[in-house]
Image: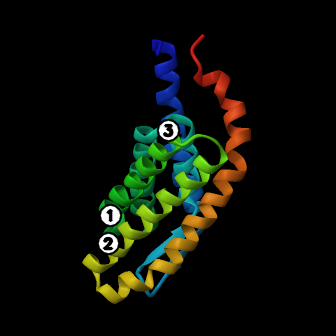
Amino acid sequence: MKKSATVRHLVFTALLTALTLIFGRFFLIPLPWTHGNINLCDVGIFIGAMLLGPWAGGFIGGFGAMFLDLISGFAQYAPFSFISHGLEGIAAGLVFKYVRGKWGRIAGVAAGTIVMVLGYFFSDAILYTWATGAAGIFPNLIQGIVGSVIALLIASPVEKAVHPALSSK
């Protein structure tokens, strides 16, 4: 990869990290029974993992979600979000990398969603109780599914728009 392509890749990673935080903050619903929230940060994570690969997806997920928690009043979740959403981006990105086509994208968002839901199950269990962890499964699953659907719908147009900027000349 040429130096200019690497710089573009880094800039796009930073942009998607910021957009992940914005997507999450724009649509954030507090959940009193888990002391957490549901949001749309998964959209940016999945788009980043699809277009930039697993490590960028992990960076976007980890830092975007962690900063979202810190500015939204959910600081107790920040380290857990860094891990859960970081691993979500890595898992999705690895599937996207090795399984091509429409089914690869569907499998990638499914893998990422499962990793995120499991991460928050254990996060809630550690922070509160196993019952709290169990209570968070459904809303976290809904968050992942909604983020997956939106990401799958916009991935191709976004890819067409940014591909020329990301490819080396």
Q: Earlier in the sequence, mark 3 or mark 1?
A: 1
Q: Are circles 3 and 2 on residues that touch, CB within 8 Å?
A: no
Residue at 44 percent across and 44 percent down: it is 94
Q: How much space separates mark 2 and mark 1, taking CA atoms?
A: 6 Å
- Mark 3 lies on a secondary structure that is helix
Name the amino acid, label 2. Ser
Residue at 52 percent across and 72 percent down: it is 141
Residue at 64 percent across and 42 percent down: it is 101
Disc on res. 97:
3
Please name whichever residue, 31 or 87, is drawn nearer the observer in this view of the structure: 87
Q: Are circles 2 and 1 on residues that touch, CB within 8 Å?
A: yes
Residue that sits furthest to the left in the current view: 126
Mark 1 packing: few (<14 Cα in 10 Å), some, or many (20+)?
many
Disc on res. 114:
none
Name the amino acid, label 3. Lys
User: Looking at the image, is 113 positioned above or below residue 123?
Assistant: above
Disc on res. 80:
1
Q: Earlier in the sequence, mark 2 or mark 1?
A: 1
Instruction: Give the x, y percent position of residue 87.
Output: 37, 53
Instruction: Give the x, y percent position of residue 79.
Output: 30, 60
Circle 3 or circle 1, nearest the eye: 3
Q: How much space separates mark 3 and mark 2, taking CA atoms?
A: 28 Å
Q: Quadrant of residue 15?
A: top right
Quarter of the figure that contains the C terminus: top right
Name the amino acid, label 1. Phe
Mark 2 packing: few (<14 Cα in 10 Å), some, or many (20+)?
many
Q: Is residue 74 visible?
A: no
Which residue is tagged 2?
123
